[in-house]
Amino acid sequence: MQSSSTPDEQRIEHAARGFLRGIGRLSQSLFRIGDFGLSRSHTTVLDALEGRSRRVTELAGLTGLAQPRVTVVLKELEERGLVECAPCPLDRRAKETHITPAGHALLEQGRQRMAVALLEGLSATVDDPERAVALARDSVTTLLHAIEPEVS
């Protein structure tokens, strides 16, 4: 059976496979190096709260986790003092959750460990580690905007 895709589509598909494998491994390595002391689900929810308070439904959409899982994760993060939940001012039936200073500190410490590891690894192989990371960030942003233009 012949493929109905064009040569351009075939080249992109081939490149995307390697990219997806690589970005997955990079994500796993960075998470391990970050040593947050939390599961990925917990860290992902905490990260999603960093910008502003959010409701469970919004967190589920941002993180890709099911709403019941987000509810469990928020309860556990609240028990650890990393988030606080309060009634939503616009809809008292709903709850909004925000990150605490301890949650911010935990994320920042993990990110610092990640940055140190990247700097050490890149310093051995590239002349300008900051530029290498900036180019990677810009490339990921370009790809993300190509498939999700509304993402800022």
Image (cartoon, helix red, strand yellow):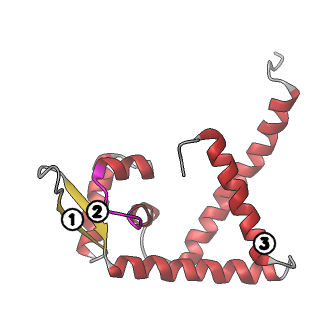
| Tally of marks | 3
Left or right: residue 117 compared with residue 59: right
Q: What is the three-letter code of the residue carrying label 2? A: Leu
Q: CA distance from mark 3 to mark 1?
A: 39 Å
Does the magenta-highlighted stretch encompass residue 147? no
Residue annotated with mark 2: 74
Of marks 2 and 1, the one in the foreground: 1
- Magenta region: 49-56
Residue annotated with mark 3: 131
Measured along the vertical axis of the image, is residue 120 above or below residue 47? below
Query: Which secondary structure, mark 1?
Result: strand
Q: What is the three-letter code of the residue carrying label 3? A: Arg
x, y percent for residue 12: 80, 38
Instruction: Mark 3 and mark 1 in contact? Answer it, CB < 8 Å.
Output: no
Instruction: Mark 2 and mark 1 in contact? Answer it, CB < 8 Å.
Output: yes
x, y percent for residue 7: 88, 28
Q: Quadrant of residue 112?
A: bottom right
What label sits on residue 85 in the rendered view? 1
